[in-house]
Image (cartoon, grey):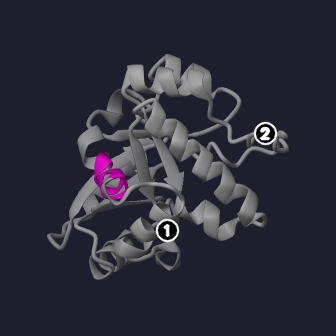
């Protein structure tokens, strides 16, 4: 099981916390490939397996998972295969509709993501920091159903910047099972980051 974090110079603390919380690996996501290269040189440990990611694809980011936060340009990102994981679709400002939620994800995006091998990410830190948890949880439930229906890869992780935002692997899996994932789907979503790489 793997977690996803956005370090801010606190890589050692995040690695130790991940090992303590039961993760076998950790994906460290950086804003640029320059920061990623510096971190690869600096980090020498054997406690857990490390993966690396960046927020923007470039020549130097080879071998790193590319993450993109969902926005109004998400369709273009998915069509052009500019990212490996697109996350936080649920955090849009649009109000919900009468018969369904404005979850940011729809069947068109799901079909494109499945066709292009792009995973949809669900962020634990978005849930923790949300002011309207009930709305956000409903949107996540709807997006999980869409991903299942169109066979889109799902990725779940803490997506936090410090160790206080991380949770135990079983707690994360249990939460997403409550939100509509089957236990096998939750386990696979915690492992998918290793397959994307």
On the image, the x and y values in percent for residue 67 come to 47, 41
Q: Nearer the viewer, mark 1 or mark 2?
A: 2
**Is residue 119 visible in this depiction of the protein?**
yes
| 172 is higher (above) or lower (below) than 183 | below
Residue most toward the left? 46
**Labels 1 and 2: the sequence-earlier one:** 2
Which of the 4 image quadrants contains residue 106? Answer: top right
| Nearer-the-camera pick, 53 or 188 | 188
| 77 is higher (above) or lower (below) than 103 | above
Q: Quadrant of the N terminus?
A: bottom left
| Nearer-the-camera pick, 95 or 161 | 95
Magenta residues, dominant SS class: helix
**Is residue 197 visible in this depiction of the protein?**
no
| Nearer-the-camera pick, 48 or 144 | 144
Residue most toward the front? 99
Residue most toward the bottom? 20
Residue drawn at the location 49% of the way across and 20% of the way down: 112
**Stretch of the chain drawn in magenta:** 185-192
Residue to which mark 2 is pinned: 99
Residue drawn at the location 58% of the way across and 21% of the way down: 108
| 30 is higher (above) or lower (below) than 175 | above
- Can you tell which mark lies on residue 157? none
Residue to which mark 1 is pinned: 175
On the image, the x and y values in percent for residue 56 come to 48, 35
145 left or right of 103? left
């Amino acid at each position: 099981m793997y977690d996803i974090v956005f370090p801010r110079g606190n890589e050692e603390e995040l690695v130790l916390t991940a090992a303590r919380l039961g993760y076998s690996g950790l994906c460290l996501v950086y804003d640029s490939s320059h920061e990623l290269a510096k971190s690869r040189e600096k980090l020498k440990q054997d406690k857990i397996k490390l993966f690396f990611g960046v927020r923007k694809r470039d020549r130097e980011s080879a071998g790193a998972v590319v993450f993109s936060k969902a926005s109004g340009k998400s369709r273009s990102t998915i069509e052009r295969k500019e990212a490996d994981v697109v996350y936080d679709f649920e955090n849009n400002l649009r109000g919900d509709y009468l018969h369904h939620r404005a979850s940011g994800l729809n069947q068109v995006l799901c079909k494109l993501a499945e066709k292009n091998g792009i995973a949809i990410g669900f962020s634990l830190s978005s849930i923790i920091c949300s002011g309207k948890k009930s709305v956000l949880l409903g949107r996540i439930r709807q997006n999980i159903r869409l991903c299942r229906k169109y066979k889109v890869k799902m990725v779940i992780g803490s997506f936090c910047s410090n160790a206080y935002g991380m949770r135990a692997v079983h707690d994360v899996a249990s939460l997403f099972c409550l939100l509509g994932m089957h236990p096998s789907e939750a386990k696979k979503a915690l492992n998918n980051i290793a397959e994307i790489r």
